[in-house]
Amino acid sequence: MNRVLFVTIFSIVFLLIDYYAFQAIKTITSNQSEGIQKVIKTIYFSFTSLVIISIVVYNFGNPDGLGKHARTMLMSFVFINVLAKLFLGLFVFIDDIQRFFRWIVMKLANPRLEAAEEGISRSKFLATTGLVVAAAPIVSLSWGIVSGAHDYRVRRIKLPVKNLPKGLEGLRIGQLSDIHSGSFWNKTAVKGGVQMFADEKVDLAFFTGDLVNNKATEMQEWGSIFSKVNAPLGVYSVFGNHDYGDYVQWETPAQKQKNLADLATIHKNMGWNLLMNEHKVIEVDGEKLGVIGVENWGAKARFPKYGRLDQAMRGLNESSVNLLLSHDPSHWQAEVLLKHKNIDLTLSGHTHGMQFGVDIPGFKWSPVQYVYDEWAGLYQSGEQYLYVNRGFGYLGYPGRVGILPEISVITLERA
């Protein structure tokens, strides 16, 4: 669909929904003076105009000139506005349905009703309820940007491992995932999150993919900050699906390859050991710990399958405990559990918990669970575990509601 057709269809559909939703506002303000009603109408349709202007500018103007953060906020404004109008319009529709059936009943009871008697006033209760419901996404999604985006939570997990050698008992592993540096808009808050990780003083640190949204250049102002993610036994990292630059157009294949090479260099410059379908054996108090890292491998949708787990595991025979870094959690069921029983713990990210849902002790829910069986927290199959980090950053919507950004700290203990 070309841009002209898209903007035309979007504008027509949105204006119809917008005007329909406005009937609830008219109902609620019907007892107000004409002057107040005009003010409310002006404010309401000013937002309508801003949405249309935003869509036109984004598609036909120079959105790059606005800066990436302004573009993100602009589209968030459009999304929140459209969502609120849809909710409000839904309640107006429900009201119209019940009014229609009431009219049918009245006509059947008395077919000779005069036209003046036939009109059934719109329900103020449903209009008011619709307004409250419509306000919910405006308030929650706006608060998710202002507060939720950087409300970092440290989640500490004790992991029982069968036959864990004494030398590895109590080993503390820190995990970050899904940084998405191209989305950040608050440097002070991000620095605070990195400092929270540093304060945990973990023995070993992992990063499980998606350092950027699309391009290595997104890390220009963030490399010095994330270089503070370190640990005595080292930092090990892997690529996620966004790191390959698959979601943007490149002038030549060579440019795309250079972008990936540049990103690998950034990992190195930050002191991170990037694992590309390979493993490292770390010795801790005389015991050997295998750290395996694969490139992105996803079993869902059309996510790339660059990972080569068999290749990464080749020659790994001497370690007591094996840990796998694999960005996409769907890899666990599709390959790890089926083929590699000697992987004790897989660490993933990718889902972000969809950045929206409910996540309280004893209960968690997010729309992403209808796509991914494992999407946040710890999962177990026999003696093998998967931990899915909820992500440090955000993508698309520049905030989080209910599913907050995470710093994971996993302590190994004897089963």
Image: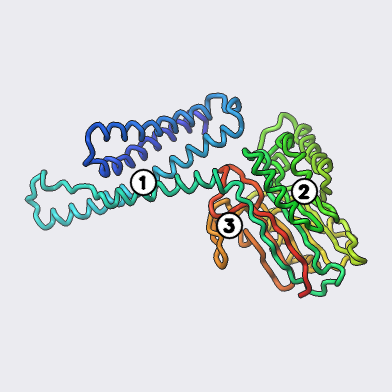
Q: Is residue 346 left or right of residue 401?
A: right
Crowd class of label 3 (few under 14; some 14 to 19; many from 20; radius 10 Å): few
Residue 380 x %, y %: 68, 69
- Secondary structure, mark 3, is loop
x 65%, y 54%: residue: 406
Q: Which residue is mark 2?
A: 229
Q: Position of residue 313 (x, y in %)?
A: 84, 59
Q: Which percent across, then down, holds residue 318?
A: 91, 66
In terms of secondary structure, where does tag 2 sit?
A: loop
Question: Mark 2 or mark 1: which comes first in sequence?
Answer: 1
Which residue is label 1 attached to?
Answer: 88
- Residue 187 position, x and y percent, is 66, 39
Task: Give the distance between the C-alpha atoms of the residues marked 2 and 1, in whole angstroms.
Answer: 46 Å
- Please say if the residues under marks 1 and 3 sit with CB atoms less than 8 Å apart: no
Q: Is residue 66 above or below residue 27?
A: above
Residue 265 in sight: yes
Instruction: Please identify the quarter of the rendering in which residue 104 is found.
Output: bottom left
Q: Nearer the viewer, mark 1 or mark 3?
A: 1
Mark closer to the chain start, 1 or 3: 1
Disc 3 designates what residue? 371
393 in relation to 47, above or below: below
Give, as a three-letter code, the residue at label 3. Val
Distance from disc 1 to disc 3, alpha carbons, whole Å, reads 28 Å
Amino acid found under the numbered disc labelled 1:
Leu
Amino acid beneath label 2 = Val
